[in-house]
Image (tube, rainbow, N blue to C red):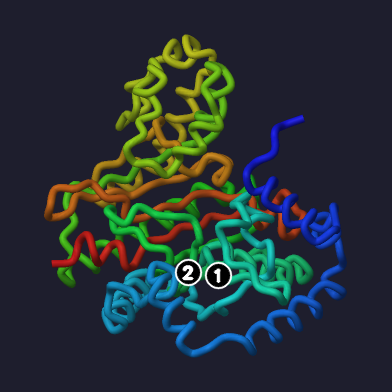
Amino acid sequence: MYPKSSEEKMLQSISEELGVHNLLEILSTAPMNRLQPMLVHMFKNRSRTVKPVDLLRIYERKQELLGISSIAQDDIYKFALMCSEAVGTLFESVQTSPVVPFGLNSGITKVSQNNVLSSLRGLEVVSDLTSQLALECALRRKHDIVHGINDTINLTTSGHVLRLQPFDKDRGYTQHFNLFALCSGGRHLVSKGGFVIPALNKHISALLDVMSALHKAGHIFSNITVKVSDMRFLDQLITATNLPRKNILRNSLNDDFDMFAEYEVKFPKEVESADELEPTMFTENGLIDEVRYLSYIERSILTPLRATYTGIRFCFDFNRKSGLGYYPNLCFHIFATNKEGNVVQVADGGAVDWSAKLLSNKKEAMVISGIGSELTQKMFKK
């Protein structure tokens, strides 16, 4: 039996003070239609004791969570419009709700429910536009499946999200911020070349077109690099070489944590071509030889993109740790250097299994991606 965490000890202490030892279990398993009226009524009663001066004090104290953005609203709108115009008719632009069903992100992405703001009415505040678009995409695919239609659904939106986990303010991150997101869903038909590869090409192309439009409008990007990864490689490496998975997950968003250097992994961090890889590089680490597979990915994704977007660097990234447990396989990052000489992640995306989960259909596939509107303006705008 594992030792109890400080949070579990606190909850147990509260339960004992109230004289109900299994209070948390009772509340956690009670039907929502029984629990919700009680909670709603409780908060209504508590709201009667709130004084206006208390509201201002809370607002002042919790500026990171409640305060205004450091980017002006008209700049955010202009940014969203430029992004939408850059992707053109490839994606349908939609306006989304500020709330989603409770458990959306923890249910399909394995993100902790502690990182989102849950409400009392079976809902939660939007913390990720891509998972929200995934719901609409899956709903449309459900309708198509019933009518025997195999069209690909391509959606885009721009909006504000809220996340409760702490962020590194020195790197420009905030708890609530604006995103531009893309989502594509469709049936994985091997006879037509599959879904994921062409969808990934479409998303990377769309984001590079967005960056080109932003560059013309005064955002200075240099040394743009698109890094493609397959998270199955990291999964296999962790298992084969007994790397501490928990510590890697804990540092998945830590830009200063170099996984390969930390654990002295004898494998290239990144290569521009599969030709730079040898089968022994895999087998010496207890891995399956993936040279042929990576050559196929290079021919299918990197080579056609290189032909279209000259001057941009494309490579394989084996040292990627962010996205472990989020992306099952293929994913990508887009980096650029800003005017201060700092390398900043501009966009992120990849293939996910969300539509397969939402529709209980393994033949359904999905690709999502996004770009941080506010972070991009902070780091790259003149």
Dividing the picture into quarters, in which one does residue 123 lie? bottom right
- Residue 153 screen position, x and y as percent: 58, 67
- Residue 312 screen position, x and y as percent: 23, 47
> In this rendering, would 204 be left or right of 189?
left
Name the residue located 32 percent from the left edge and 45 percent from the top edge. Answer: 226
Name the residue located 60 percent from the left edge and 64 percent from the top edge. Answer: 134
Dividing the picture into quarters, in which one does residue 108 lie? bottom right
Classed neighbour count for the residue bearing mark 2: other residues with Cα under 10 Å, few (<14), some (14–19), many (≥20): some
Name the residue located 77 percent from the left edge and 30 percent from the top edge. Answer: 1
The amino acid type found where label 2 is placed reads Val
Q: CA distance from mark 2 to mark 1?
A: 5 Å
- Residue 273 screen position, x and y as percent: 33, 29
- Residue 203 screen position, x and y as percent: 43, 57
Classed neighbour count for the residue bearing mark 1: other residues with Cα under 10 Å, few (<14), some (14–19), many (≥20): many
The amino acid type found where label 1 is placed reads Val
Residue at the spot of label 2? 161
Dividing the picture into quarters, in which one does residue 27 lie? bottom right
Q: Is residue 253 visible?
A: yes
Position of residue 187 relative to residue 265, above or below, is below
Q: Which mark is residue 126?
A: 1
Name the residue located 32 percent from the left edge and 50 percent from the top edge. Answer: 345
- In the image, 293 versus 231, the foreground residue is 231
Circle 2/circle 1 CB separation < 8 Å: yes
**For the residue labelled by badge 2, is the local secondary structure a helix, a strand or a loop?**
strand
Position of residue 285 relative to residue 104, above or below, is above
> In this rendering, would 136 be left or right of 287?
right
- In the image, 186 versus 162, the foreground residue is 162
**For the residue labelled by badge 1, is the local secondary structure a helix, a strand or a loop?**
loop
